[in-house]
Image (spheres, helix red, strand yellow):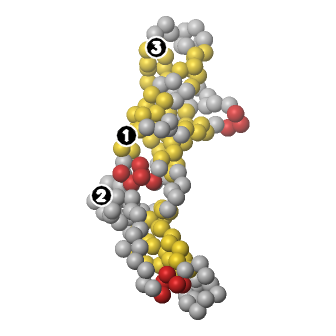
Amino acid sequence: MPTPSLQRHSGFGRGPGPGEDHQYEMELTLEELFTGGTRELTVPMTVSHPQTRSRYRVEPSYTVDVVAGWKEGTRISFPKRVVEYPQIGKMQLPPVTFVVTQRRHPYFERIGDDLLIKVRLTSAQAKKRLTMEIPLLDGTKGMPIKGGPKRGKLFVQFQFTDRGSSFNHPRGSASMFY
């Protein structure tokens, strides 16, 4: 599994204050948002020992169960917890929140629960009634809708690339959906 992409949210270079959430972006692929799954994330942070006030850099792990159909902006929160580290002792870790962001997909664009794919055609291809296969994420329609068996729609937008030819669509493109 590739190293998770984590971006820390904090104001002007300083971390959250005592008792505040540590907030991170969790970048997921469209495929991960489509199928769901499990992500194991390690988060580097600095915490203070409660008795000695010494500061330690720790890297606690969090397991996130990605639910099929999650959208960008979904927040996953973990409460503060106590972890015991060898040679340091018990440390209280602050609350952690992950905010989902979606990595750009090379073919599909997500619009709510729907998927859009843009297909470029020349007028010569369109005149020949070209048959083409469109790659799908898993052979079904749009994105799963969180919490149910329903799915969004798959939109296919045809973009005609040679506008000066005799086969002009009034708007330069046509759309259909399944």
Q: Mark 3 is on which residue type?
A: Tyr
- Residue 42 location (% of width, % of height): 49, 30
Q: Is residue 87 left or right of residue 17?
A: left
Given this view, does label 1 or label 2 mark the residue nearer the observer?
1
- Residue 167 location (% of width, % of height): 55, 90
Quadrant (top left, top right, bottom left, bottom right) of the C terminus: bottom left
Q: Mark 2 is on which residue type?
A: Gly
Query: Would you place residue 69 above or below residue 89 in this image?
Result: below
Query: What is the crowding at mark 2: few (fewer than 14 residues within 10 Å), some, or many (at least 20)?
Result: few
**Residue 128 visible (yes or no):** yes
- Residue 128 location (% of width, % of height): 45, 85
Marks 1/2: CA–CA distance: 19 Å
Residue lying at the far left of the rendered structure:
149
Q: Earlier in the sequence, mark 1 or mark 3?
A: 1
Instruction: From the viewer's side, name the closer residue of 21 and 28.
Output: 28
**Picture disc at residue 101:** none
Q: Earlier in the sequence, mark 2 or mark 3?
A: 3
**Picture disc at residue 148:** 2
Q: Residue at x 51, y 70 (%)?
A: 118
Residue 166: quadrant of the picture: bottom right
- Residue 8 location (% of width, % of height): 59, 37
Marks 1/3: CA–CA distance: 25 Å
Q: Secondary structure at mark 1?
A: strand
Residue corresponding to mark 1 = 38
The answer to whether the residues at label 1 and label 3 have Cβ atoms under 8 Å apart is no
Given this view, does label 1 or label 3 mark the residue nearer the observer?
1
Query: What is the crowding at mark 1: few (fewer than 14 residues within 10 Å), some, or many (at least 20)?
Result: few
Residue lying at the far bottom of the rendered structure:
166
Residue corresponding to mark 3 = 85
